Image (cartoon, coloured by chain):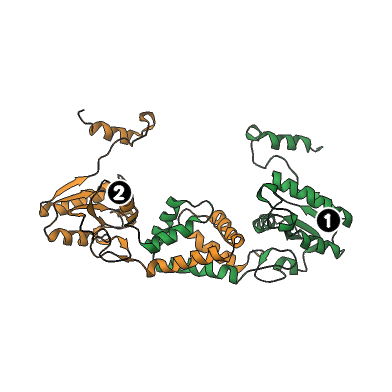
Chain colours: A green, B orange
Amino acid sequence: MAATPKAVSRLIDAFCRLPGIGPKTASRLVYHLLRSGREDALALSQALAALHAETMFCEVCCNISDQSPCAICADPGRDQSTICVVEAPLDVLAIEDTGRYKGVYHVLHGHISPMERIGPDELRVKELLRRLGEGKVREVILATNPTLEGDATAIYLAQVLQPFGVEVTRLALGLPRGGDLEYADRMTLSEALAGRKRL
Amino acid sequence: MAATPKAVSRLIDAFCRLPGIGPKTASRLVYHLLRSGREDALALSQALAALHAETMFCEVCCNISDQSPCAICADPGRDQSTICVVEAPLDVLAIEDTGRYKGVYHVLHGHISPMERIGPDELRVKELLRRLGEGKVREVILATNPTLEGDATAIYLAQVLQPFGVEVTRLALGLPRGGDLEYADRMTLSEALAGRKRL
């Protein structure tokens, strides 16, 4: 369109490539940046340029970090005999947020999904098995998502972990705290029933 | 948090400064960019750096453009005697999108709002009056938003435009096409009634 400067439409296109940002949101962001002044746009630009340059994968847990081994793997206060296996770096943050876990992590960077042609070789499974080969691990907590793909990944990992003779656990399924029984979906309620505990 | 690399949290902060993007959305965007590879992040970074460098305000209509006068103001096919006054550059795009307007624009870059301490001096009103001083304008369409602030801005402009003896009009208010009478708000329905037309 004649009314849109090239620099504007190029930035709109770049924003549109991000998940959950459509053309309307993208143009609102761009015109906000035009209004709010040069500094905000440049700060975002520089932070983006630094993102890959200043981060790396931790050679132990495969999480994204600014050092390798990462701060958690290098922390002598963490229990190196318990590994919590998650799909993504954001899952590590969620578990750290609870303040209830003192072990270490392993980030798979995805889940097994035949539909998306993602098998174990596309995930950081080799790296996990190498860590177990060192013989110091006692328990592996499979904290993949409670989804079809997360379950498939957990079942696969449980199989390949069997020869190592470590304890393999999975996060509990049930009603979310603060939820309403009336609005719980059938699957969640079934899991909560099946996993009921004696008081 | 120990688990978040500095480059990641800096980019999360920069995204959070954008409207409608909270910490959760920001971290999802950042980890998406980490996963999707270096090129997407660099393309976005470069487009942001170019945004202010490659755009300017049109000296005639005050719209954002990559040349001055902008493509619309410089177009001999546009009717220079009709000026449509809007609050923001996105409003120009919306009106252009209709394909029904052949005049030129004037972008105020805001609306009068005593609450936000925005008066006429903070808007591009002087520039509008200068254009009218040239004596070639026949009609000014006040296309500020149908809000309290947009109305206040239109009423103010109608006053200061009076001495120029040009026709001053305002966009029609009424039911939006495709809407449902049952769900129309009271204000809109009142305007639609008051503005009813003989068939």
Q: Is residue A53 left or right of residue B58?
A: right
Q: Is residue A136 at all visible to an observer of this figure? A: no
Q: In the picture shown, does residue A187 fall above or below B107?
A: above
The quadrant the C terminus of chain B occupies is top left
Crowding around mark 2 (Cα neighbors within 10 Å: few <14, some 14 to 19, many 20+) is some
State the residue at coordinates (74%, 37%): A192
Q: Quadrant of residue A82?
A: bottom right
Q: Residue A55 in the image: x percent, y percent?
A: 62, 69
Q: Residue A75 in the image: x percent, y percent?
A: 75, 68
Indicate the amino acid at tag 1: Glu
User: Is label 2 on the same chain as label 1?
Assistant: no
Q: In the picture shown, does residue B187 fall above or below A34?
A: above
Residue pointed to by mark 1? A139
The quadrant the N terminus of chain B occupies is bottom right
Indicate the amino acid at tag 2: Ile
- Disc assigned to residue B95: 2
